[in-house]
Image: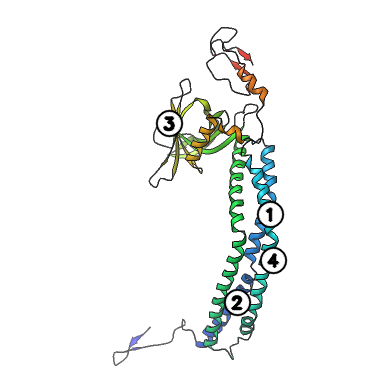
Amino acid sequence: MNRPTSKGRQENKPTSATISPAEQLKRDIASARSDFNSLIDKSKLTSIRDEYATLDSDIAQLSTRIQKLRDRKYAFNKIMESQALELQKQWTLKRGGIQSHIIFESNSLGSQLRPIESRVAALSLGSTTQATINIIKNEIDSFETKISASERSCREMYSSIGSEVDKIKGQLAQIEKALDWAESASFGFLPGESLVNAVKAVWTRDDKEDKEDPDGILFLTDQRLIFEQREEIATKKVLFITTERQKVQQIQFEVPVFSIARVNATKQGMFKNEDWIQLDFESGCFARSAKLHIEGQDCNTWQQLITQVKNKELDSDRALAIDQEAIEKAKSAPEKYPNCGGAITKPVLRGMDYIICEFCGNKIKL
């Protein structure tokens, strides 16, 4: 502790935190060596080599991933196959030149690094001054800039194709997730019914979302819009603390897409970052309307998809053809129930094998 002297000045006494010039020099030498070792690793352009290898693998796997989707009966986005082939052609033309450039830049950096390596190797407590350390540190900092420039020159050669690959990979991942949800659904899809998309959603019973609203998955097929509740709900509470839960997975509503009169997409929330869709239905549906908060996907994309399905615009984007026999079967469905003569008011969808009379309860085979 500093205490006043007889003349009113404080006397400085050494503390354990004080570092001697020799100790500081020792630390600076160790720091310079550590920074240089890091520089050696960076000069090999390891991160660029890893990016190149990942991109090379991703492009090689595109066709396989798309074929797996087709095997799982995903029928749309027929352009994906041609996009994958085009990317593979572009990459075949570029990959050799990119690889050569990475090797050239790495070798060049290694050659330029040798003079600094010699000076770092010569550092010692007996002969090195602080000025020498400072010069070497500045050289290391300058060399970091050279490495960054080399990395940029390499990335410029594949960034464009990399962006295209990332885009199609994102589409594939979304479709794969939608198919996973569909395959684990509690309900069955009609024969020949094709999944278009699926998204996590909350069905709000009124204009405000609350904890009582069902949470689940919204499925869009080429014939139906289906909301399936999927969540764990509290079945027992003790002093407001949940002690037991039950998993609920069941359809909350389904409507034929052609029964959707209007669909409106809106961005809500304080920062307009919440995606909502408002659906208005024709008469005969379970309700006049439904409002859903969708998560992780754009509401405008969903508005467009529902509209395209309703207008049959997606038929031209099919990679897997529709079963014409199923189409004719649905078209030839009777207008009246043969047993009671009641009018058939519920829609007959492609792939349905039978309908049940809403008057007498008899099953009618189509």
Q: Earlier in the sequence, mark 4 or mark 1?
A: 1
* Mark 4 vs 1: CB contact within 8 A: no
Could you tell me residue 287's position as x and y percent? 45, 24
Location of residue 21 in the rendering, given as x and y in whole percent from the top left corner: 50, 87
* Alpha-carbon span between mark 2 and mark 1: 32 Å
Q: Amino acid at mark 3?
A: Arg
Q: Earlier in the sequence, mark 4 or mark 3?
A: 4
Q: Is residue 71 above or below residue 144?
A: above
- Give me the residue at 43% from left, 86% from top: 14
On the question of residue 304 being in view, the answer is: yes
Mark 3–mark 2 Cα distance, whole angstroms, equals: 63 Å
- Up-down relation of residue 29 to residue 320 (above or below): below
Residue 330 lies, in percent from the top left, at 61, 20
Residue named by callout 2: 36
Type of amino acid at the residue the image marks with label 2: Phe
Cα separation between marks 4 and 1? 18 Å
Q: Which residue is mark 1?
A: 57
Mark nearest the camera among 1 and 3 is 1
